[in-house]
């Protein structure tokens, strides 16, 4: 799997079936030169997971790579390729177009670990995964995983070995492998890849969940200095993405003696600092839980309206331009919009699910901030596309169905978000 890619480096995740000696060979399509990483050994205690950092990379070039295990090149039936980020600042008016895919709620069935229906038969919650071929066909510059990227079951979340087995089973699924191998992937988590349903900061296996997350997702960073968690940020052209952690700091759900927080004060200050400092045209704030919803049946920021108001007020007071939210979790898709007096509206693109079950509850889907005509109950992924000349960029938000057909789109200009 391709992980974080920048101008002069790239990360490649590899998992072997057993302890092995592994290296990555990669070829610069411009110069024709081939490079090799140092050899590393995968081990059972690390789930046989390795992350390789490719440092002989130059900006704006295409690289083909191969995985060499115990001296033999692994033959794969799909391309293994990535493109490094181009240099574009201080180089005239041309800015590269940017396409970012996003999604949440990926469930892969495994016989013996599924719930029983009323007849006593085992019934998997997952569905076919042709959706990943549709994502790959759009050739995005990145794929943002917005939580519930695996679904840990009851036998999984109580042990490190169980977590490793669930991640390994989901990662090895054939339907997603071609997309993983050619698209840079970034992830945050939500409850089902953190612990049990609706889990919060009280979850006693959270440190183990963090360790396993780091093994399988080669993000550019994890958490804050002096704090744990998984928030991170990266630039993709003139878009900066802030991926938030909605579990590590979340108040215990049933405590009523304190104000409810999801991000926690330290992470919220990190976010506002980063947004204020960013010179990106558009700033995408990506988080597992919905931000712009007032439906108390959901498990997003409607349960922490104090913290949401604090975040939005800070964005407003600091006159931060170009902010757009992206979220998952709810098992349907929608666009939400919050009008703000005296400044631009905030939009939120919610995409869910990739392959897990659908939410058909009408009362659950009620949301005052919903943009009419954007609710979609079907398997889907989101697309954020940015194009245009410097100073006149446009941002298009889309929901795309599993077959690759656009369901709807909404376009706003750079000036609309100032």
Image (cartoon, grey):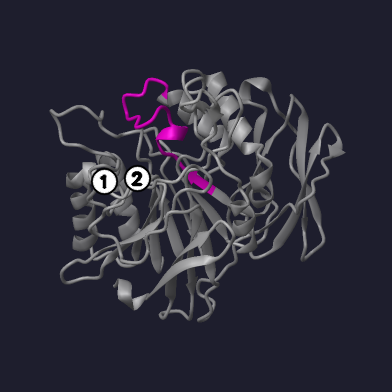
Q: Which residue is at a point 33% across and 77% down the rendered structure image?
A: 415
The verdict on residue 220 being magenta is no
Quarter of the rendering occupied by the C terminus: bottom left
Q: Foreground residue, 186 or 63? A: 186
Left or right of 91 in this view: 40: right
Q: Residue 391, position in %: x, y?
A: 41, 80
Quarter-of-image position of residue 182:
bottom right
- Residues at marks 1 and 2 touching, judged by CB atoms closer than 8 Å: yes
Alpha-carbon span between mark 1 and mark 2: 7 Å
Q: Label for residue 301?
A: 1
Left or right of 320 in this view: 155: right
Q: Is residue 359 above or below residue 21?
A: below
Q: Residue 86, position in %: x, y?
A: 60, 66
Quarter of the rendering occupied by the N terminus: top right
Hey, which residue is sitting farthest front in the picture?
Answer: 119
Q: Residue 279, position in %: x, y?
A: 39, 65
Q: Label for residue 289?
A: 2
Q: Earlier in the sequence, mark 1 or mark 2?
A: 2
Left or right of 47 in this view: 230: left
Q: Label for residue 11?
A: none
Q: Which residue is at a point 66% across and 46% down the rendered structure image?
A: 175
Quarter-of-image position of residue 188:
top left
Q: Is residue 31 above or below residue 379?
A: below
Q: Count neighbours of disc 1 (C-alpha within 10 A) and say few if under 14, some if 14 to 19, many if 20 or more.
A: many
Q: Secondary structure at mark 2?
A: loop
Part of the protein shown in magenta: 186-205
Left or right of 240 in this view: 17: right
Q: Is residue 6 visible?
A: yes
Q: Secondary structure at mark 1?
A: helix
């Amino acid at each position: 799997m391709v992980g974080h890619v920048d101008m002069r480096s790239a990360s490649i995740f590899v998992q072997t079936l057993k302890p092995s000696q592994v290296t990555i060979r990669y070829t610069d399509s411009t110069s024709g030169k081939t490079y090799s990483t140092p050899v590393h050994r995968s081990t059972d205690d690390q789930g046989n997971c390795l992350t390789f950092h490719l440092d002989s990379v130059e900006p704006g070039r295409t690289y083909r790579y191969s995985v060499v295990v115990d001296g033999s090149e692994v033959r794969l039936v799909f391309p293994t390729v990535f493109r490094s980020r181009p240099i574009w600042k201080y180089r005239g008016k041309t800015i590269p177009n940017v396409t970012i895919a996003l999604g949440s709620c990926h469930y892969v069935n495994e016989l013996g670990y599924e719930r029983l229906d009323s007849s006593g038969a085992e019934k998997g919650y997952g569905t076919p995964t042709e959706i990943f071929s549709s994502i790959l066909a759009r050739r995005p510059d990145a794929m943002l995983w917005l939580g519930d990227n695996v679904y840990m079951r009851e036998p999984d979340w109580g042990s490190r070995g169980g977590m490793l087995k669930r991640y390994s089973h989901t990662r090895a699924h054939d339907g997603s492998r071609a997309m993983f191998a050619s698209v840079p992937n970034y992830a945050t988590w939500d409850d089902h890849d953190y612990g049990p349903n609706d889990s919060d900061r009280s979850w006693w296996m959270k440190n183990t969940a963090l360790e396993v997350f780091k093994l399988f997702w080669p993000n550019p960073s994890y958490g804050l200095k002096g704090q744990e968690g998984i928030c991170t940020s990266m630039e993709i052209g003139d878009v900066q993405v802030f991926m938030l952690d909605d579990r590590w700091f979340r108040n215990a759900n049933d405590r009523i003696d304190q104000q409810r927080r999801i991000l926690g004060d330290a992470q919220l200050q990190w976010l506002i600092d980063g947004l204020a400092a960013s010179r990106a045209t558009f700033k995408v704030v990506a988080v597992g839980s919905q931000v712009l919803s007032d439906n108390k049946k959901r498990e997003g920021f409607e349960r922490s309206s104090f913290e949401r108001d604090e975040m939005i007020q800070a964005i407003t007071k600091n006159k931060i331009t170009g902010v757009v939210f992206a979220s998952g979790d709810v098992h349907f898709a929608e666009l939400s919009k919050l009008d703000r007096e005296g400044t631009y509206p905030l939009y939120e693109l919610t995409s869910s699910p990739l392959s897990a079950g659908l939410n058909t509850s009408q009362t659950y889907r009620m949301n005052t901030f919903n943009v009419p005509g954007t609710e979609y109950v079907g398997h889907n992924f989101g697309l954020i596309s940015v194009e245009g000349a410097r100073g006149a960029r446009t941002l298009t938000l889309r929901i795309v169905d599993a077959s690759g057909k656009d369901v709807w789109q909404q376009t706003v200009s750079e000036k609309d978000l100032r």
